[in-house]
Image (cartoon, grey):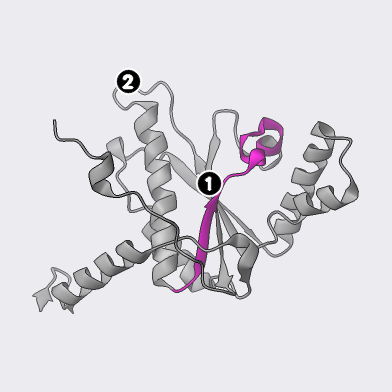
Amino acid sequence: MVELNNGLAFDALNDRSDALTLLESRRSASAKAMTAPGPSDGQLDRLLKIAVRVPDHGKLTPWRFMVFEGDARERAGCIVAERYHELHPGHGEETLELQRQIFSRAPCVVGVVSTAITDHPKIPEWEQVMSAGAVCQNMLVAATAMELGAQWITGWFAYDRQVLTAFGLAEEERIAGFIYLGTPVQLQEDRPRPEPASITMRF
């Protein structure tokens, strides 16, 4: 047993083993195969607290969250569909309906917004952007540990400035990812992973 400074104790060996097993087996769920319930308020609060425990050079907090639940998913979908219709006026109602439902595929969607400062004198923008990516990954791992389904998605609308403005993003802000959260209705098959030795060199 290990005694922590705050008086809490835990079995370090078992906790580390469980964490490694989780990391070795983590895989994304499919947003198309999620249903209710999504994370409870308590689970979502815990997910976000875990998400922000990432490397953040200079303590800049170069990210923030947008949560889409309930009717907000439909409102966001209408924004996406309207913009899609402007870009592709020849597409029919069936395609537009798919766009309207883009946020309704899961009970909860968390947008991770990259708020990187481009002209910081000491911390490159790239480091800040990677920190936002780490936030997304932390959330995926934590959701898996909670036995929730989770998938990191962007989509064309994540790169459309008109959509982002309608979502309330500032001109310099970008979407690092939309994390779809819900209950998986079926097990997700794992995909082939690269053999580390095939992509590793020693300098």
Local secondary structure at mark 2: loop
Of badges 1 and 2, nearer the viewer stands 1
Spatial CA distance of label 1 from label 2 is 26 Å
Quarter of the image where the C terminus is located: top left
Residue 191: horizontal and vertical position, in percent? 45, 58
Residue 10: horizontal and vertical position, in percent? 18, 77
Q: Residue at x 56, y 72 (%)?
A: 184
Residue 29: horizontal and vertical position, in percent? 52, 63
Residue 15 in sight from this viewpoint: yes
Task: Say which of 37 and 98 sits in front.
Answer: 98
Q: In this view, does 118 lie to the left or right of 18?
A: right
The quadrant in which residue 116 appears is: top left
Q: Is residue 155 magenta?
A: yes
- Provide the residue designation for mark 2: 121
The residue stretch that appears in magenta: 147-164
Q: Is residue 198 magenta?
A: no
- Provide the residue designation for mark 1: 177
Local secondary structure at mark 1: strand
